Image (cartoon, rainbow, N blue to C red):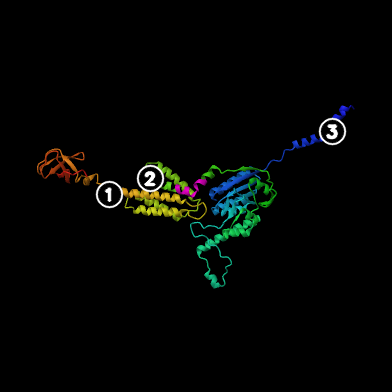
Amino acid sequence: MKRGSRVAWIVLCCMLPVLAALAASTGQPAAPRSMVAQIALDGPIGPAAAEYFDDASKRAVADGAAAIVLRLDTPGGLADSMRQIIAGMLASPVPVLVYVAPQGARAASAGTYILYAGQIAAMAPATHLGAATPVALGGGRPMPLPKPGRQPASAATAAQDETPADDAESQKAMNDAIAYIRSLAQLRGRNATWAEQAVRGAATLTASEAAQQQVIDFVAADVAELLAKADGHKVRVGDREVTLQLKGASVREYAPGARTRFLAIITNPTIAYLLLLAGIFGLALEAMHPGAMLPGIAGGISLLVGLYALQLLPVNYAGLALMALGVGLLVAEAANPSVGAFGVGGLVAFVTGSVMLMHTGVPGYSVNLGVIAGMAVGAAALLALIVWLVFRARRAHQATGDAALLADIGELLEPVGAGGEAWMLVRGERWRVRSGTALPAGTRVRVVSRQGLLLRVEPAPADATHP
């Protein structure tokens, strides 16, 4: 064999393993990069937030997400909406990583429960959680905090310490909230003792303190660090144990849909309040001016949308009734002006009902007091205008009828003898008149009385003017 052929053969033999490895690597597709869905709950927890999480989590699972990152920044919200979100998290077929972010965010009240429900709980630096004491809806007194260590010494002492009915209801709600958050803590292996303190005493923690007390799993500066630190953790999803493999996963944002955004707008208490007022006043204007159409149509739509929003919100129905009474009295004052009794009563009822309507103490679920004050000032200004117009009308000279004609000044169109009759021009009309004295044509006379179509007149004073 020639020397050149031998070298070529050696090179070919050396290249065969490399070619085989390349063929093997190109013959098998690379492992696909996992995808993580991100859902952001910013603001109060309410019906819109619950619907958003439910819809977005289902879309994420259908798209093949390996996990869901629930980014949280909330002052709290409604208990029913919170429980709906947690129920969706517990039923999710993929792990849910709850992440309180960005810096300065909080997971207060209902947010603390949601944080405890996640398979992974993490917080960004400079965030906090806690203050999970439930608030009684309806504007009642705040739930009393139990006095630690107090035990009745005897049956007599126990009888003295019996809880009134209202306090009993508050205590039942408190115990239910404690049991709920403790069950979540036990499910996820987190600090159940501090969870109870957050409910009983409104305790709070910073991110670093929460990590030290095993309330959360770790502190992460951003989502990439969250996924890197969560990688390798073993979590329970339903009845199976899953090892998270999320390092380097792509993150896809799931924004709320059009329906959810619309629901978020109308369930804002201030927007719902304004829709309700627009509906009531629109229908009132239509009733006062039949056939206008636009006020009635716009008012009906606004009222129905507002009522739909109110049935999703914690409404005080006594406040709603007072608002309706107040608006009714204001409309009655406008339709049948009085000395202001209806208007003043309506203004007081309207403002009182507005303040009571959703003043529940639930974070983010009360009507803006500035809006109420603006509406009250506007109603007061309208009432003052109506009363002023009424008094001005009562002081004004009557423009029609006998009262307007009497004492009016006119001019004789022809001479008249004593006790005789002639024609006179008054207010652009010709009237037959009778005078007790003889008067020449062109004399200015004043109407004294009327008998049918005949006016009795007398000479007008030189300085007399038209009333």
Find out whether the residues at labels 3 and 2 contact each other: C-beta distance under 8 Å: no
Report x, y in % for residue 183. 62, 57
Q: Nearer the viewer, residue 430 or 348?
A: 348
Q: Residues within 10 Å of mark 3 (few under 14, many from 20)?
A: few
**Could you tell me the amino acid type at mark 2?**
Leu
- Residue 52 at what x, y percent from top left? 56, 46
> Which quadrant of the figure contains the N terminus?
top right
Tell me if mark 1 has few (under 14), some (14-19) or many (20+) residues whose alpha carbon lies within 10 angstroms of its own.
few
Q: Is residue 45 above or below residue 432?
A: below
Disc 3 to disc 2, C-alpha distance: 97 Å
**Element at label 2:** helix
The image quarter containing residue 216 is: bottom right
Residue 46 lies, in percent from the top left, at: 54, 50
The nearer-to-camera label among 3 and 2 is 3
**Residue under circle 2?**
285
Residue placed under numbered mark 1 in the picture: 394
First in sequence, mark 1 or 3: give its number.
3
Tag 3 residue: 13
> Residue drawn at (32%, 50%), measured in percent from left and top?
387
| Residue numbers of the magenta segment | 263-274
SS for callout 3: helix
Could you tell me what secondary structure mostly forms the magenta stretch?
Answer: helix
Label count reads: 3
Report the amino acid beneath label 1: Arg
Q: Is residue 320 visible?
A: no
Give the Cα distance between marks 1 and 3: 119 Å
Q: Is residue 5 visible?
A: yes
Left or right: 277 in relation to 214: left
Q: In the image, is 459 to the left or to the right of 16?
A: left
